Image: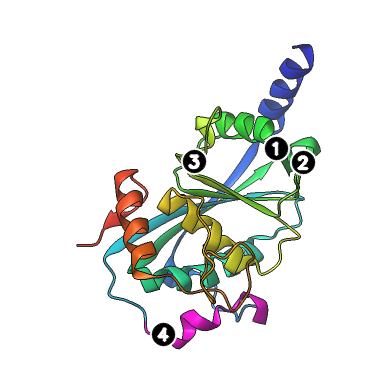
Amino acid sequence: MKAARHWQSSLTACLAATLLLFSTAAMPQAAPAKSQAPAAAKRSAPAKVTHLLHLTAVRLEDSGWTDQRVLEVVRSARRVLTQCGVKLERVELVTLAVPANLRDFSRPMARELVRDYRVTRPAVYFVRDTLSSPALEAEAIGHSNSGSTPALANTVWITAAIRDPAIALAHELAHVLMDSGDHSDEPGNLMRDRTSAQNTALTPAQCALMREAAVRHGLLKKAK
């Protein structure tokens, strides 16, 4: 208990934030790395916009992430969601300075972080590494799998060493929006258990589930 109290007080003392708001039109337009460019999404025309997404991107300082890299990853990932009629309308970028022991993901540490600095969901946290076992490069926590940590519902956690970061973000965000941990065996599908620049497609059924579940949980708004 003493260690927990000390940890919480350290977080309170060291937590600092810088907040920036971006519309999608204002996001950086530099070309992302090839591994971040979802090829399948580029080949097909975006669906008609039916739903709007407001996303919070939380970057931990000294985690290996920069604001520019975060925004480039988010910009590339948004293209994948357009096939479901989902438009990323706004990104809120929050930069947090936290103690070194809080830069790596674990559910107990994440729970304290979200408790002491609350942001609008869905939220993506860009962290240094993970302490979870098995060690995953990214984790999605929706309503259905938040379990004993409901405070983490509707969050995604991505480590700095993630491969294909834009595809991984789209994959994990889709898990949260669909409120489902299901994977697909279909070739080229975004929800295959291993992310790849070639895996970007979503089926009509997956898109329908994404829109329905996300609206129900207040994560998407219907476009006017």
Q: Nearer the viewer, residue 87 or 116?
A: 87
In the depicted structure, whether residue 187 falls above or below residue 71: below
Tell me if residue 68 comes above or below residue 154 in the rendering: below
Distance Cα–Cα, label 2 vs label 1: 5 Å
Give the residue type that dot 4 points to.
Answer: Ser
Amino acid type shown at disc 3: Val
Question: Which labelled disc corresponds to residue 106?
Answer: 1
Which one is closest to the eye, mark 3 or mark 4?
Answer: 4
**Which residue does the numbered mark 2 point to in the structure image?**
131
If you read the primary sequence from the N terminus, does the residue marked by circle 2 or circle 1 appear first? 1
Mark in front: 1 vs 3: 1
Q: Nearer the viewer, mark 3 or mark 2?
A: 2
Q: How has the structure been colored for display?
A: rainbow
Q: Which residue is nearer to you in this view: 53 or 16?
A: 53
| CA–CA distance in space, label 2 to label 4 | 38 Å
Check residue 70 in the rendering and tell me which mark sits there, or answer none: none
